[in-house]
Amino acid sequence: MKIIGSVKEDLAAEKRISVTPDVVKKYKDLDFSIYLEKNYGNHLGIRDEEYKDNGASLVNSSKEVLEKSEIVLRVNCLSNDQANLIKNQSILIGQFDDFSNKEIINKLIKKDIKIFSLNSLPRITRAQSMDVLSSQANLAGYRAVIESVEAFEKAVPMMMTAAGTITPAKVLVIGAGVAGLQAIATAKRLGGIVSATDVRIIAKEQVESLGGKFLSVEGAENLETKEGYAKEADESFKKKQTDLLKNAVKKNDIIICTALIPGKKAPRIISEDMVKSMKPGSIIYDLAVGQGGNSAFSEADKVNLVNGVKVMGVKNILNNLPLTASNLYAKNLFNFVYNLYDKKKKSIFLNEEDEIVSKTLITKEL
Amino acid sequence: MKIIGSVKEDLAAEKRISVTPDVVKKYKDLDFSIYLEKNYGNHLGIRDEEYKDNGASLVNSSKEVLEKSEIVLRVNCLSNDQANLIKNQSILIGQFDDFSNKEIINKLIKKDIKIFSLNSLPRITRAQSMDVLSSQANLAGYRAVIESVEAFEKAVPMMMTAAGTITPAKVLVIGAGVAGLQAIATAKRLGGIVSATDVRIIAKEQVESLGGKFLSVEGAENLETKEGYAKEADESFKKKQTDLLKNAVKKNDIIICTALIPGKKAPRIISEDMVKSMKPGSIIYDLAVGQGGNSAFSEADKVNLVNGVKVMGVKNILNNLPLTASNLYAKNLFNFVYNLYDKKKKSIFLNEEDEIVSKTLITKEL
Amino acid sequence: MSANLSAIFYLISGVLFILALRGLSSPGTSRRGNLFGILGMLIAITVTFLSIGNFSSGFIYVLIFLLAGGSVGAFIAYKIPMTAMPELVAGFHSLVGLAAVFVAISAFLNPLAFNLGLPGDIKLSSLIEMSIGAAVGAITFSGSIIAFLKLRGIMSGSPITFKGQHYINLLLGLTIIVLIFYLCKNQSDSFFWSMIAISFLVGLLLIIPIGGADMPVVISMLNSYSGWAAAGIGFTLENTALIITGALVGSSGAILSYIMCKGMNRSFFSVILGGFGGTNSAQQKDKTKKPVKSGNSEDAAFLMKNASSVIIVPGYGMAVAQAQHAVREMADCLKKNGIKVSYAVHPVAGRMPGHMNVLLAEANVPYDEVFEQENINNDFASTDVAFIIGANDVTNPVAKTDPQSPIYGMPILDVEKSKSVLFVKRSLSPGYAGIDNELFYRDNTLMLFADAKKMTEEIVKNLG
Amino acid sequence: MSANLSAIFYLISGVLFILALRGLSSPGTSRRGNLFGILGMLIAITVTFLSIGNFSSGFIYVLIFLLAGGSVGAFIAYKIPMTAMPELVAGFHSLVGLAAVFVAISAFLNPLAFNLGLPGDIKLSSLIEMSIGAAVGAITFSGSIIAFLKLRGIMSGSPITFKGQHYINLLLGLTIIVLIFYLCKNQSDSFFWSMIAISFLVGLLLIIPIGGADMPVVISMLNSYSGWAAAGIGFTLENTALIITGALVGSSGAILSYIMCKGMNRSFFSVILGGFGGTNSAQQKDKTKKPVKSGNSEDAAFLMKNASSVIIVPGYGMAVAQAQHAVREMADCLKKNGIKVSYAVHPVAGRMPGHMNVLLAEANVPYDEVFEQENINNDFASTDVAFIIGANDVTNPVAKTDPQSPIYGMPILDVEKSKSVLFVKRSLSPGYAGIDNELFYRDNTLMLFADAKKMTEEIVKNLG
Amino acid sequence: MEIDPFIFRLSIFILSIFVGYYVVWSVTPSLHTPLMSVTNAISSVIIVGAIIAGLSGNIESIFDTSNIFGFLAIFLAAINIFGGFLVTQRMLQMYKKKKKNK
Amino acid sequence: MEIDPFIFRLSIFILSIFVGYYVVWSVTPSLHTPLMSVTNAISSVIIVGAIIAGLSGNIESIFDTSNIFGFLAIFLAAINIFGGFLVTQRMLQMYKKKKKNK
Ligand SMILES: NC(=O)c1ccc[n+]([C@@H]2O[C@H](COP(=O)([O-])OP(=O)(O)OC[C@H]3O[C@@H](n4cnc5c(N)ncnc54)[C@H](OP(=O)(O)O)[C@@H]3O)[C@@H](O)[C@H]2O)c1
Ligand SMILES: NC(=O)c1ccc[n+]([C@@H]2O[C@H](COP(=O)([O-])OP(=O)(O)OC[C@H]3O[C@@H](n4cnc5c(N)ncnc54)[C@H](OP(=O)(O)O)[C@@H]3O)[C@@H](O)[C@H]2O)c1
Ligand SMILES: NC(=O)c1ccc[n+]([C@@H]2O[C@H](COP(=O)([O-])OP(=O)(O)OC[C@H]3O[C@@H](n4cnc5c(N)ncnc54)[C@H](O)[C@@H]3O)[C@@H](O)[C@H]2O)c1
Ligand SMILES: NC(=O)c1ccc[n+]([C@@H]2O[C@H](COP(=O)([O-])OP(=O)(O)OC[C@H]3O[C@@H](n4cnc5c(N)ncnc54)[C@H](O)[C@@H]3O)[C@@H](O)[C@H]2O)c1
């Protein structure tokens, strides 16, 4: 198992890549061979030469790559055609979604392909370096703020000038997970007045550790699971949260939504009324739009203008930051492969006792 | 002279407005009457009611406003039609350009209209509160960075993460005037590594006072005029600057151009070669594009992709920040009117001995 | 009272004096310290009475003089304006010096009464001790008089130097030693009197060349002298109280003047030798003689610690020095002490619109402590300290008064209305507008000449 | 040698001892201080020889014992490992105490030789002084022995308390006083000997209940006792050197132990009375008895000031405490002293990717001082101080060694390789991963228990 | 083998110098002036000598020159004692008031 | 009217206490151990008493019990003197080395 390959994604939907020239070098150090489809990184300004210089082989068609590779690296799931081409018993690593990719996954399992979905990576310390959810959400949080500020028709920081004072923009971050925290940090940097809310009580300290203000829902129990994710809230909690947010939403200029419960539809937190209560010119950026959205009126890849409020959401915000996102993603993949690699035997060995292996491996048909 | 009016601008080219609800109140305190064209601030989310609540009268047509007003407030020059409608001997205040507005200005002068162009405001301490160039350039600097960062496909701040380190983006600001300084501040805030260059030596201290690094052209004389603007540089200086910048440009990810010599075509500072020497994915934002641009390939309101480098420039960047910009602009105008207002006589009095009056008044045909 | 018992009481009064000085070294205990001092003095005087024991008619005279002096002293203490403190202390010193001389003379004239032998046949050691006491006392007296006159303004405060002054002083000092030597040999009155006379002269010559600015150091130095004089007399009279107290005052005075020199960044010797004072005042003359009060970080810390509200006015200098973090930290310290802190940001402070906001935000100053000019200008009048850091033009009242000035008409921050104004800047040089700021010369202004960051950091240290 | 001359020399040696202690109060002058001490001792011994003046054969014996003792002392001083310092000092104390007892006994047996009267008819004052000297000396001796045994580990370090111990001590103390009283009345040997015996007992009982952690305070306290004992003997022998030095050592020891208590945040009395020590060690027992070295800001400042390079390792605690500005300021101070400062940022420090970068950027830490783990991990070995502020998991070596641990396999910062490791955190509680960090218990680790911001600010103060 | 009391006095003198040195070493600058003034007041302990001088000699001739000098010295020292302590008191009162404002 | 020398000694004693108090008041914590060790060494000035005790009595009977106690005391104190100062020296040496590294 020493041949790693990667083919181009569907550029219309995905600009990220799974292999960067940097990691090619790292794979080579472990004696892997790398096959990439030609023009693999062209759309990001990465020329084929850069890959070649680092030791990758570039081949003309995706077919060739898939037929050769024993390990295939992906961002998204393979297309149907690609699934047909991939070698039996090979390993496929990427971010796969149980729901939307069901058919293809079933097909691949039939071909006895070992599918590792990094979406199911356990949130344990050792897995941090492979945690694509973290690495990508982090960038998503940053980017959401940048895009919101760009869309915002006022200046964010406070400026006391001879022509009067510009009051600082108020930014509310809903959900203080990885994406939310980075959003807080970025908004703070730009000089916004930042507050945030979350169902997990521990988030309070974390928000404050970034200089943000935490809006606590009174009497909230701690809705954190052992794994560090959020549990679904009950009705009484939701009611209290709504009351709290009704007020907060009205006063804020920019709202970044990142609330999420893994495996569930995203909680609806901002109602239509709340959106309408905001000042014209305000922004709602809904990062959870892919999971159904935290806010009313949010639609993927659209900007909806509601009473002068821009409600925005992008399905794949990382397409707007593809270079950095790919760098991190490719490193995550490398670290994952490295974990599969037996340093003594100098080859891939799937240790099923390893939580990281067992939890990410999709073995049964869905 | 107690009737002030303002009509809508050409919304295609200008989103800023000259009168905000806030300043209406201030004018009323001085017993002015305010006439505005209906839907005056609609495009910015300001409803006519807000103006009315503060005491302005909203009339149905621009014609009515122009015929009634003794003082007309503008952002840009009047259109030909409007120039025909404006009352003889009235006062017109705004930002007018000797070159592009020549004909209209001549027409107005013939109608014995007192035209004040705030572009010619002397940069004296007392005039700071009316200085539209400053107030607008300040916002332009901020906005240029926000837009560049949005266009930039990588993250700006340094992040050391489990998936590897994101190196901070390098930002170079050319020209450390009002716009440049605010650009430096904004880029610093976002975590960029910021350097800047200018011909005025005093700018070094100012750049450093914002935490930026100053790139000094060796042996540069001080090219500052008494009025605090820049002088044109000689050839030997330009050569030295080019050498310095050749290196710097290559290393930077984002370049914000703000260099300007008043009344002259903007200096060409970044050559075609320099642009091409940059990494793919880099950004050049040319704020001086309206005056001819500091950079090769920069064109107003276009994004040119040159070897993967995005060269951007907007003619009126303030259209992207119209609310804040209008707030400041309207206050500047108010302060200007207030300066014309004789507190004892409680009326407008044009004191020609006042530098502010004499320098801004266009008396002769161009 | 037995000699042993009185010796013990003298020891106690000495200890009380130690506790007095100790108390004075920190504000919290200072008042108690003063009480210890009073108590010590009371004990010393009472014990002296008791140990002499002969309540003859002389006793009444002693009481009369004591009370007369006391009332004069009390009167002066109550009448004197607080601003005249330095010259008052100088004046008092001269009295101690003179008293020491008188006691020495008395002992010299009537050694028997003091157990020192017979007139004309005084014990050698006593004679030496008494001469030293008298000489130092005389120097203290005349030196203090000069210091008093200079501080009072009766004599020009500027240093009066002349060529060879150090040599003359040296010569006179040697003369005193020679005179004492002969006095010991001959026990002749004339040597004694001339020694005292020359000592008076030395006192004059020592202080005349020292400039007014250095007077506090001089006073402390004279204080020290008066201590040594008392100690000398103490040895003569074999009195422990005098010895302990004299040594205490002598050394603490010397140390104090050393500390003060250090605080002013002046060399101890250049102050004491006086000649160097000249350079300093020459500079002052250039500045068209307007006097400026300048302080150090400790003064600033003290003023702010005792304030109930402080307004910080940042300007371009704070940006240049990148002092924003230090300023924030200073504000934190103040707030911890329950002092209200706000920031007043002038619309054109700095060199770009919103310059100060950028920096304050960077230092994480909460937005609700930052006020624009219009909203805070009225608060200065009810504020104890305006802390102006690297700002200048934006506080210059000339903008309100002088139509000729380039900044006429600009609204300014009314910092001068607060009780004390602290200006942190490196020099008296003007700001962007290039005009002098008369606030620097006001009575309630204290200039803190230093780089903004360094000064603020030092203030933080002294606040802690 | 005349009594006067030797008195003067004794005074000089006393002054030298003062200068010795003074020197020891700051690192720069400490070595000179020690020399002063040696010089003072040399003078005291020489003068004693000269003033006795009869160089009989006894003199030879004195020399023999002196040299014998000296060689033993020198031998111990060279052989002892640096880590055994505390018990060494305790051991030495016991010797001083015993020596004082011996001298007192000698004086009691042969008062004539000391000018104290005849055996059985010793001067009252001398008898009292000598008894006090002997009693305090005996307490010092036996107390120091216990301290020594506890520190050496021969005796359990945990405090041994029993009911009514304070009453027993009180009773014994009263007994001593009564015995001295009767001794003065009867001058009977037996009272003298029993008094000494009971004093030994008191020493044992005083120290036994005190826990090992408080031993440094105890040693300093015993130091003080030995001083008082020497002073007591000094009064008996009418020897100024002994009086000055004894008082000096006595009071400085007492103050030092007070300061140490303050530094450890313990009440002076609870330490000295011993009973309270129990509570403390109970806590320690919970922590499975692993000893932790904890220090204060001054220790940290001292360590860093004397380092040539410092690596700062920030963690989530720095973020919680919002200590980034203070940390930056600390780094500035260090850099001003020519110390190299870098920051080591672990990829998962904090609670979000890049958490530390956000904060360091906010505090304006230059990018080129911030290193990611891979690039700086090798530098720890050549670094003097690793300053870990609010980080925990990211430094936990268990990640390398224990496959069972939840953080096994995570790359960690090798902070333990640097010469000293400072941990700023509020307690011994674990970090995010919930596991204990064995670094806390290492020999080259100093824990600084406090809020990160407060501690850093204090360190800054102590650096300045 | 009695020791000359002078030696004792010398010891006392020297130790007092040390005490004086240490006692003011760490004083706050803002207390310099009151400290100076209290030191000044204390230095008028010279009055002890003055009283001795005033009361020296026979009971009859209390107006010997030496006595007169003594009386003058008492007068001067007394001014200093009262003036010095009271003025210090006043100064310190000021500090106290400021504090209370808080 | 001679004063009892005891009073002088008492004065000296009390003043020394003050000096002791002040002299260590501001010591750096890191110097606590060396300071303690030097104080310990200094306290062995008790050797002065020991020498007197050892040499007391007639020249013939130098092995009186009292002398023997004296000799023992000399021995003990001597250990302390040498040991104490040398060990302090060693400790301080460490500090110095660290400094030089800079
Ligand atoms: N805000 C804007 O947009 C803008 C733009 C252009 C001009 N201006 C003008 O700039 C001025 C702003 O007023 P301002 O009060 O902020 O500044 P300022 O009047 O220029 O005064 C700044 C002061 O800071 C001191 N300083 C400089 N470096 C320092 C350092 N490292 N440490 C301590 N002090 C330092 C200087 O005195 P020393 O040299 O004695 O230290 C100087 O007097 C106004 O006149 C305004 O009109 C403003
Ligand atoms: N970076 C990420 O993206 C991310 C995300 C999730 C989890 N994590 C995990 O978080 C951990 C990060 O490691 P770390 O070393 O930064 O943090 P850590 O191991 O959680 O340790 C933080 C320490 O800071 C101390 N602390 C808290 N508040 C403090 C205060 N105010 N002052 C002083 N100390 C304070 C705590 O000890 P006391 O209570 O004794 O003071 C605690 O032991 C890793 O286990 C990592 O896996 C990281
Ligand atoms: N559009 C994109 O391209 C893109 C990219 C990355 C991440 N994301 C999305 O961003 C979101 C956040 O990602 P993450 O990694 O930070 O997830 P996360 O699980 O770390 O954080 C989600 C946070 O929301 C909180 N939360 C859950 N229910 C809540 C409620 N009712 N009210 C308030 N808070 C609630 C949770 O406690 C948690 O802190 C997800 O929806 C993720 O899919 C989108
Ligand atoms: N596009 C827009 O909507 C918009 C809005 C506001 C301002 N602007 C433009 O932004 C620019 C800057 O405005 P400003 O108010 O800061 O002007 P400014 O005069 O304050 O600053 C211009 C700076 O450029 C420097 N400079 C001149 N020649 C240079 C050279 N050869 N090399 C380096 N530096 C040089 C000058 O010294 C000066 O510091 C202008 O071109 C202005 O028109 C554009």
Image (tube, coloured by chain):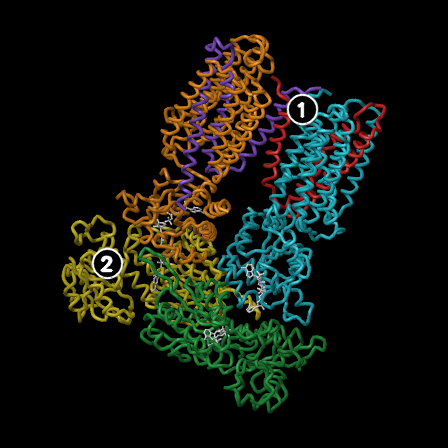
Chain colours: A yellow, B green, C cyan, D orange, E red, F purple
Q: Is residue A68 placed above or below B23 in the rendered structure?
A: above
Q: Identify the mark at residue A301; answer none if there is no mark.
A: none
The residue located at (66%, 45%) in the rendering is C167
Which image quarter holds the N terminus of chain A?
Answer: bottom left
Q: Which residue appears at 81% of the width and 29% of the height? A: E67
User: Which chain hosts label 1?
Assistant: C
Using the image, determine if residue A38 lies above or below residue D47: below
| Residue visible at 60% across and 44% down in the picture | C259
Residue flagged by tag 1: what amino acid is it? Answer: Ile
Between A118 and A259, the residue placed more toward the observer is A118
The quarter holding residue D294 reads top left
User: Would residue D270 appear left or right of C444 to someone viewing this image?
Assistant: left
| Mark 1–mark 2 distance (CA, rounded to whole Å) | 87 Å
Residue position marked by numbered label 1 in the rendering: C8
Q: Which residue is mark 2?
A: A26
Is residue D193 in view from this perspective?
yes
